[in-house]
Image: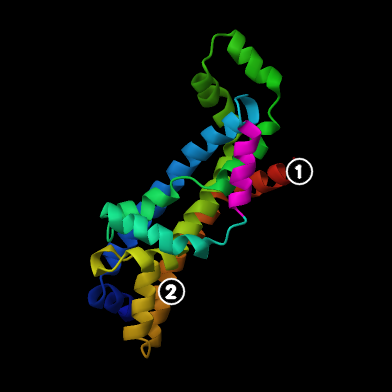
Amino acid sequence: APTLDPYRDLFRLLPMGRSLFNSLFVATTVTLSNMLFCSLAGYAFAKLRFPGRDALFLMFICSMMIPWQVNLIPGFVIIQKLGWLNTFQALIIPNLAGAFGIFLCRQFIMSIPNDVIEAARIDGCSELGIYRHVIVPLMTPALATLAIFTFLAQWNSFVWPLVVIHTGSMRPVSLMIAVLNGQFGANFAMVMAGAVVVTLPMILIFLAFQRQFIKGVVLTTMR
C-alpha cells in the first residue's frame, strides 16, 4: 500500500531539512547575484565604450574554454587561506558572476536599439537609471533564462561543495544524496524519496519560468 514512511525516515535519520535550506540559500543568493552582476556587465559590454572593452570581453569568452577542473586546487587553496572552509562564503562568493551569464546578457542587450538608450539620456537618465528603467524591463526573458541555468547549476553542484565543505551541518542536498546512497543504499524506498525531494524544487522552478525561459532562449539565439 502507498506510504509516506520513507519520507518520514529521510527527515528523521538525516539532516535533510538543513541540507535543503543550505542548497536553497546558496542557489537563490548566487542566482540573484548573477542576474544583477551579469546584466550590469552585459550592459557595459554592449552599450558603453571604454578602453579595453573588446579585449576584456574576449578574455571572458576565452575563460569559458578553460576546464572547470583546472580551478579546483587553486580555488581550494584560496578558500583555505581566507578561512572560508565549511562556510556559505566558500559556496557563494566564487560564483557571484560567470562568463556565460555575462555573454548571454551582452548578446541580448546588443539587440536593444541605441535610439531607446539615447532618448533616455536626453530625458536626463543616468547610466544606472537607463539600466534600471530601460534595460532590465526589456531583458526579462534573458534574465529568466540565466536564473534557471544558474539555479539548476548551483542546486546540482557536487564537486566544489565536496572540496570545500566537510561538516554535516553545511552539506547541500547534492552531498546529502551521496551520504544517503552510502549509508542507506539498501533502503531503495528511502533513496527514491530523497531523489524526489531533491528533484522537486528544480521542476517547480522550471515550470514557474518555462515561458520566459523558452522566449529568452529563442530571442538570444536569433540575435
User: Residue 145 at what x, y percent from top left?
Assistant: 58, 47
- Residue at 71 percent of width and 24 percent of height: 113
Which residue bears the numbered disc 2? Answer: 195
Looking at this view, is 221 or 159 the one in front? Answer: 159
Q: Against 55, is 86 above or below?
A: below
**Secondary structure of the residue carrying numbered label 1:** loop
Say which quarter of the image contains residue 41. top right
Figure quadrant of the N terminus: bottom left
Looking at this view, is 56 or 164 the one in front? Answer: 56
User: Residue 9 at what x, y percent from top left?
Assistant: 28, 79
- Identified by mark 1, the residue type is Met
The span picked out in magenta is 53-64
Of callouts 1 and 2, the N-terminal one = 2
Looking at this view, is 161 or 53 the one in front? Answer: 53
Q: Against 221, is 190 above or below?
A: below
Between disc 1 and disc 2, the foreground one is: 1
Does the stretch in magenta take in 80? no
- Identified by mark 2, the residue type is Ala
C-alpha separation, residue under disc 1 versus residue under disc 2: 36 Å
Report crowding for label 2: few under 14, some 14 to 19, many 20 or more residues within 10 A (C-alpha).
Answer: some
Q: Is residue 16 left or right of residue 221?
A: left
Name the chief secondary structure element in magenta.
helix
**Secondary structure of the residue carrying numbered label 2:** helix
User: Residue 130 at what x, y percent from top left?
Assistant: 55, 21
| Residue extending farthest bottom | 186
Question: Any mark on residue 222, and which?
Answer: 1
User: Residue 184 at what x, y percent from top left?
Assistant: 33, 85
- Residue at 43 percent of width and 46 percent of height: 96
State how the image is colored. Answer: rainbow
- Residue at 61 percent of width and 8 percent of height: 122
